[in-house]
Image (tube, coloured by chain):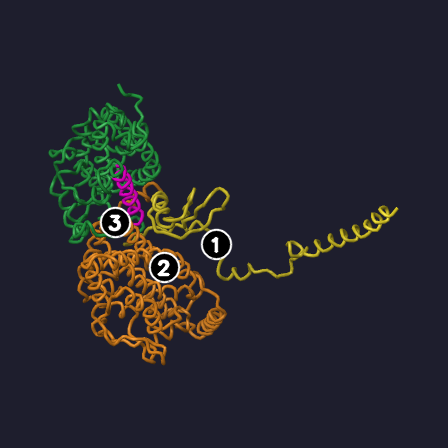
Amino acid sequence: MVQFLQVDSAQKAQENPEYKAALTELLFQLADDDFILAYRGSEWLGLAPHIEEDVAFSSMSQDMMGHAVMHYELLDELGLGKADDLAQLRKPEEFRNVILAERKNGSGEYNDAPKYDWAYAIARHFVYGSIKQVKLEALRESSYQKLSFVSRKMLTEHRYHMMHWQVWMKQLANSTDDAKQKLEAALEKVWVDAGELFSYGKQAATIVGFGIVASEESLREKWYASMQQKFTEIGLNWPGDLGIPAESGRDGQHTPDLANALQTLSEVYVLDPQASW
Amino acid sequence: MNENFDIYEVFSQKNQSSSFAHQFSLLAPNAEIALVMARENFLRRDQCINIWVVKRDQIHMTSPEERGNLERLDNKSYRETKGYGDLQARWRKHKEAYESKQQPNVREAGER
Amino acid sequence: MQAEMNQSGLTQTISAETINDQQSDKMEAFLSRIDRGERIEADDWMPDDYRQQLIKLITMHGISEIMGALPEKEWVPKAPTLRRKLAIMAKVQDEMGHGQLLLRVAEDLMAPLGKSREDIMQDLFTGRLKFHNVFHMEAPTWADAGVIGWLVDGAAIITQTMSLDSSYAPYGRALQRICAEEKFHAQHGESIVLELAEGTDAQRQMLQEAITRWWPSLLMFFGPPENGGITSNQQLNMRYKIRTQTNEELRQAFLTKYVPRIFHLGFTLPDETIHFDEESKMWVYQQPNWEEFKQIVKGNGPRSAHRLNLREMSYEETKWVRDAILAYGRKVG
């Protein structure tokens, strides 16, 4: 229908309430996914297995949070409110991130006896990142030109991250038996949640209909093909179809992990959101 | 730990007009991991278009004793620009001599 | 380390005299190099006590950067805006990066003694290796994050700038990279502090409390005053041009730079006596409790055990990862 629709400004997007609603929904998904997983990544600061890796990992969390900020700013332009408010004042049920992004890094808290699982960190970032990549590639063709523009910019940085995660996946998978077992267990844990990353939630039909991003199925197909090949290259068994968690993050259903995370993330800001910080 | 990570020296190239420059060293279990960690450890704010990592024990270096011998006598002006500092003055002299010969002729021609 | 030195002492008894002569020639050459302002490289000959002094100083400096990441890290997710979350994440990352640079310098010095990063970590966990007093303290509010960035980093910049001219070249090179980034850290800290200082009454109060809380620790940061008597340890460092200024000289430079600024913002210090004495050209101030300082550095500060535990636990929890990638390298070659 609207295959060649091109929306080149926030103003134009706002002129069509249906378009704006669909676009807003997708932008919240993209922003919240990166924001929450970047937060999980940042919890590793100072605790990574090796000092040099600690430094390298932090850049990727920063980059991801930077991507989230770019999306929140697009929402701000659409009149949804300031980026800082969007990130810190919404209630958990208003968040659209997938459950995979909010899961804790392991048992314990980041400041209190953290027993973080590096295998889960690698597996989660690798799988999340590979799906983000097919999504960003599709978003280059988005009918919302501003989204297409930022997606192109993010891709370079993102590919650099993928190189990092892929090296780690390959090395852990081909090192000690212990590491391989831990990696496989982590992949299993990631696998049951990761299917949700292909979901655009309840507004999927309008989001795709307006050409804001390609269909869930087309992304899934692309990902399965490239991922199965990667698993073969790495020497890992293919775990089968991706699962979907019990809660639907895209519909605002979340685990207590998210509420805890948001409480931490907004702890200072909520003291006085009107103040300048 | 009986076994340790290796030391890798990191080099980077800023742009295509510049040569590779040494940055610093890092500890890594192998070259591949060294390479994926290198940029963020030493080039978080600087631009780079290419990175090398070299295992330190693969680098052959001048020994401390031999390093002193790298110094050379300062008597090689014949192969440096500074050894040819007189050229400009000489060219100027020739130019001035020529011009001073020309000018009277010009004047004479005008008077005629 | 002691064991190795004793061992080499044993083998040397055979022709102690010849070796002593050679050693004293080397020592003389070494000292005259230092006096000429030349810098020493990792593989140059150096006297044992020079190596030991450097190892002590640089491992402590490096591990302090790494332990210093922990109190600030508490504020990374909590930073009140997206921009501040990113900035403080980048700053803590830099601190880890500084730790990396310094540990690499220390590791190269320790290599001839058969020691590595693993030994540094174990020394930290057993309490043999100390870290700066400031990183044993609590940072209970966002203003503490600001004060750490502004004043703790400010204090660090003063000591690090002095050491830029260190006779040990690799340390100087590492510090050059570090000092360049510290400029960003100082701006980061000032920006947080100014925002609070120009903010609401509650924000100003939060900042005042943090300044009051951190003041004794900031004075302690430079170590006890010499009061005319310089320790043999300091004498050695000065003779070897490892450092060029005394604790008190550095503290005075800090006070000159920061006390006026604290007053300009309208804040007070928990010391009514502090003033600049025009005659002696020195700051006169109330001494912090130096006995407490000793206790803190020994690992009996309010957060010492907690942070050490955090560091040790994460190190042990991830041992399998280091083993795994090492094994991968051995397999692939």
Residue A43 drawn at (x, y percent): 22, 48
Residue A158 drawn at (x, y percent): 32, 38
Q: Secondary structure at mark 1?
A: loop
Q: Chain of mark 2?
A: C
Residue topped by disc 2? C111
> Alpha carbon of mark 1 to alpha carbon of mark 2: how far?
17 Å
- The answer to whether marks 1 and 3 mark residues whose Cβ atoms lie closer than 8 Å is no
Q: Residue furthest right?
A: B112
**Do the residues marked 3 and 2 share a common chain?**
yes
**Letter of the orange chain:** C
Q: Which residues are magenta?
A: A54-74
Q: Residue type at mark 1? A: Met
> Alpha carbon of mark 1 to alpha carbon of mark 3: how far?
44 Å
In the figure, what tint was chain A given?
A: green
Q: Chain of mark 3?
A: C
- Residue C191 is a magenta residue: no
Q: Chain of mark 1?
A: B
Residue B28 in the image: above or below residue A7: below
Judging depth in this view, the residue of C233 and C50 nearest the camera is: C233
Q: Which mark is residue B61?
A: 1
- The answer to whether marks 3 and 2 mark residues whose Cβ atoms lie closer than 8 Å is no
In the figure, what tint was chain B given?
A: yellow
- Residue A61 is a magenta residue: yes
Q: Residue furthest top?
A: A1
The quarter holding residue C122 reads bottom left
**Do the residues marked 1 and 2 share a common chain?**
no
Q: Residue type at mark 2? A: Ala
Residue A140 in the image: above or below residue C222: above
Label 2, residues with CA under 10 Å away: few <14, some 14-19, many ≥20: few
Residue topped by disc 3? C85
Q: Residue type at mark 3? A: Lys
Judging depth in this view, the residue of A18 and C59 nearest the camera is: A18
